Image (cartoon, helix red, strand yellow):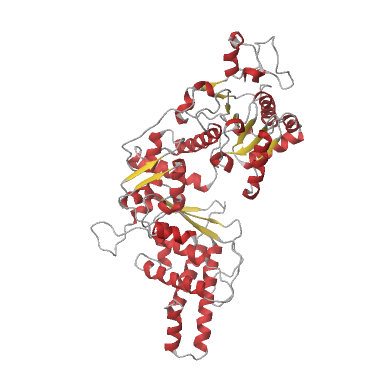
Amino acid sequence: VCPYYLSRSLKQQADIIFMPYNYLLDSKSRRAHNIDLKGTVVILDEAHNVERLCEELASFDLTPYDLASAIDAINIVLEEQTRKVQQNEVTFEFNAELANSGLNMELEDIAKIKMILLQLENEIDAIELPPSGSGLTKDGSYIFELFAKAQITFQTQASLLESLEQIVQYLAGRTGIFTNTAGLHKLTDIIQTVFNFGPSEGTSSLTPDCSVSRYYKVHIHPDVNGQKKKQRTDLWNSSATKKQGKILSYWCFSPGYSMHELVRQGVRTIILTSGTLSPLSSFTLEMQIPFPVCLENPHVIDKHQIWVGVIPNGPDGGFMFILICRFSQECLSSLGKTIGNLVRIIPHGLLVFFPSYPVMDKTLEYWREHDFAGKIEAVKPLFVEPRNKGTFTEVIDAYYGKIACPKSNGAVFTAVCRGKASEGLDFADNNGRGVIITGLPFPPRMDPRVILKMQFLDEMRAKGASGQYLSGNNWYKQQASRAVNQAIGRVIRHRQDYDNGVPSLCIEYDQVPISSRRQPTGLLDALENNEKNLGEPSEEDSLPGEEKAKRVSTLSLQYEKKLMDGQKGGRKKSRL
């Protein structure tokens, strides 16, 4: 029995159904899986991902290769059916054969679809882009204007979708050489996304409600990946040129659009749960639907189980990971010395998170060239999160194995924020006694989607919706703080984690202040900003040994200095 079709059958009588986000949030998936939400209670776990997924599932990127693939598939159908006609088959027999194959279409209908796709391809290619190569951005309503030039409108989209579906079914059922129908599937999804609305209230069914386009931006940009893999040379081809192709992007910038769709489906209750939704006020603004009940609990752990601090300077006094010079020798060296000290104090497993893969790669390369990696590995072996998910399990199992080895001093695992290790893995107990965030993982500032998201939010506020939307700058900072919170959460996994030790959380703030209100409630009381020079004697030296241990003031020791120095405060490794 196929588990997929069995589950589809059983869900009709089920009281509780577990499913991925996209089955709920994507209207196309809801229709495909026949999911009826009327009167249901919807629980979205790990809801910090909802904003991104709502926007992504309501967006698309149409590449030149997608269009070329779709046209090639239609060409195959057109050529096959043309050959049958040319073989002097009786028209009745021809139509009967097509009907039996699921393709109840005339040759003229197939040819018309090809013309529509070629016209769409021509219209996209004809758009003039600025010489800078940054792409061209237009309001969301432009998508209707562009599609109308290719005869794709609210009035024609239903028949076009039906024809595309018939062609896909025909190609799937035919014998012989496999035909790639991914382009046709994507075009079907795109048309459904663009025209995913009904008529305006109080108007005829022929008058679409295009107001949803206010949540969107159209962005046309060069296809830098060169995905236009094929050059067709038939008489109908208008794109058999060597020009660089263009990608048509239709991006949604309001998760509230998808959430409103859920409400319109008749959902009784929507419950969002996550440990990193703080601040709740701004999160509810993003969702654009009312949440009459909000519950924000303190963390299950006690204050003595965790130490949180900000360390802007290394033991040599150098700044660590300032945004404008994060690749400088001073920053990389200072960070290497700091972690070199920390691996000696923090027992068992230590996690080190970087803002991105390029930053991690550059840092590790510098450490290897200047022997910082060697000094770290002399205390704890160093494991690196691979970009390839296929080898991730092997690496993480080796890390866990080293932690479990009774003769081992533990291990260091370097990873990136928003990566697999920071989002979904459990580093409970000895697997994660400390976590270091080496810089705030802001979204890439020059990414067109990030730029347009910030512009969209600022535009909506300027139009008088300031109480309904975050500012672009606040959204940008919030993305970084939530990614940090997710990474920190890897080492706090249960009530007794870690009850007889001090997991250390070291957060470096790239000289961009992030409000503590964006931190989870359980971390606020533990947060301590260590901005003073930890390398100089201070009044901390007169504190009791237990308090000094909680403040991890051993960081004041120089890189080559012994950790056990009873003359300066009596700091003891056993206390940590």
As drawn, 338 above or below 442: above
373 vs 477, left or right, is: right
Q: Position of residue 395 (x, y in %)?
A: 66, 43
x and y, in percent, of residue 286 in the image: 39, 41
Q: Residue at x 50, y 48 (%)?
A: 449
Residue lying at 45% horizontally and 64% vertically, measured from the top left = 188
**Could you say which quadrant of the image residue 563 lies in?**
top right
Residue farthest left in this picture: 202
Residue 499 left/right relative to 320: left
Task: Examine the rendered structure and indicate whether residue 529 appears above or below residue 470.
Answer: above
Relative to 488, 154 lies left or right: left
Give the mark count. Answer: 0
Q: In the drawing, does residue 3 fall left or right of residue 257? A: right
Nearer-the-camera pick, 338 or 10 = 10
- The percent coordinates of residue 112 (x first, y second) are 44, 75
- Residue at x 45%, y 71% (from the top left corner): 116
Viewer can see residue 142: no
Residue 143 point in image, percent of width and height: 42, 59
Which of the pair 153/22 is nearer the observer? 22
Figure quadrant of the C terminus: top right
Up/down of 216 relative to 566, above or below: below
Q: Quadrant of residue 224?
A: bottom right
**Considering depth in this image, is 345 or 341 the residue closer to the camera?**
345
Quadrant in the rendering for residue 158: bottom left
Q: Is residue 263 visible?
A: yes
